[in-house]
Image (cartoon, rainbow, N blue to C red):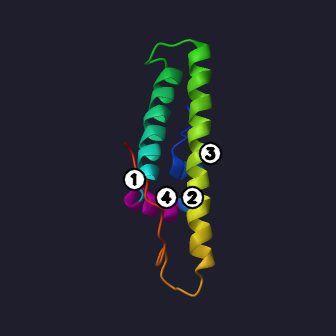
């Protein structure tokens, strides 16, 4: 059985530049991105049989991955909306200021 890749670049190829920018400039996005990749890797191992699991656990992990992907896509679309609203600038991401995220 062929296991399909679900990394964000393959999922959203038209948004590669935004993903790269957010990974480098937004700690919250970078943290979610890392969580997504770790979860995707775990699911991949489960599907290959390298990580023992039940169908229920696998389905729960897939649901978590969908939620993370939705959250990441929201970040991407919001960043692109800011960029598109600033069309007078010719440089990509020029003037983009993302709200700081504080963790305590």
Q: Which residues are magenta?
A: 16-25
Depth check: 27 or 62 in front? Answer: 27
Marks 3/2: CA distance?
A: 10 Å
User: Which element type, helix, strand or loop, lies under badge 1?
Assistant: helix
Of mark 3 and mark 2, the one earlier in the sequence is: 3
CA gap between label 1 and label 4 equals 12 Å
Give the mark, 4 or 3, whose residue is nearer the N terminus.
Answer: 4
Q: Are marks 2 and 4 in contact (CB under 8 Å)?
A: yes
Mark 4: secondary structure: helix
Q: Earlier in the sequence, mark 1 or mark 3?
A: 1
Which residue is located at x 61 percent, y 38 percent?
Answer: 67
Q: Nearer the viewer, mark 2 or mark 1?
A: 1
| Marked residue nearer the N-terminal end (1 or 4) | 4
- Cα–Cα span, label 2 and label 4: 7 Å
Crowding around mark 2 (Cα neighbors within 10 Å: few <14, some 14 to 19, many 20+) is many
Judged by depth in the image, the label closer to the viewer, 1 or 4, is 1
Question: Counting other residues with Cα less than 10 Å from the Cα at mark 3, is it few (<14), some (14-19), or many (20 or more)?
Answer: few
Whole-angstrom CA distance, mark 1 to mark 3, is: 17 Å
Which quadrant holds residue 66? top right
> What residue is disc 3 on?
70
The x, y position of residue 98, in whole percent, is: 48, 64
- Badge 1 is on which residue? 27
Residue drawn 62% across the image and 45% down it:
70
Q: Nearer the viewer, mark 4 or mark 3?
A: 3
Depth check: give the residue in front, 2 or 89: 89
Alpha carbons under labels 4 and 3: distance apart? 14 Å
x then y, percent, for residue 28: 44, 50
- Report the residue marked by disc 4: 19
Q: Report the magenta stretch's main SS.
A: helix
**Element on which disc 2 rests:** helix
**Residue that carries the numbered disc 2 in the rendered image:** 76
């Amino acid at each position: 059985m062929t296991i399909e890749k679900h990394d964000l670049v393959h999922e959203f190829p038209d948004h590669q530049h935004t993903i790269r920018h957010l990974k480098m400039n937004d700690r919250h996005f970078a943290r979610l991105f890392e969580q997504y990749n770790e979860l995707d890797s775990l699911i991949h191992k489960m599907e290959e049989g390298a990580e023992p699991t039940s169908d229920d656990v696998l389905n729960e992990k897939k649901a978590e991955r969908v939620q993370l992907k939705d959250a990441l896509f929201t970040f991407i679309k919001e960043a692109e909306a800011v960029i598109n609203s600033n069309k007078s600038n010719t440089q990509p991401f020029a003037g983009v200021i993302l709200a700081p995220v504080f963790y305590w």
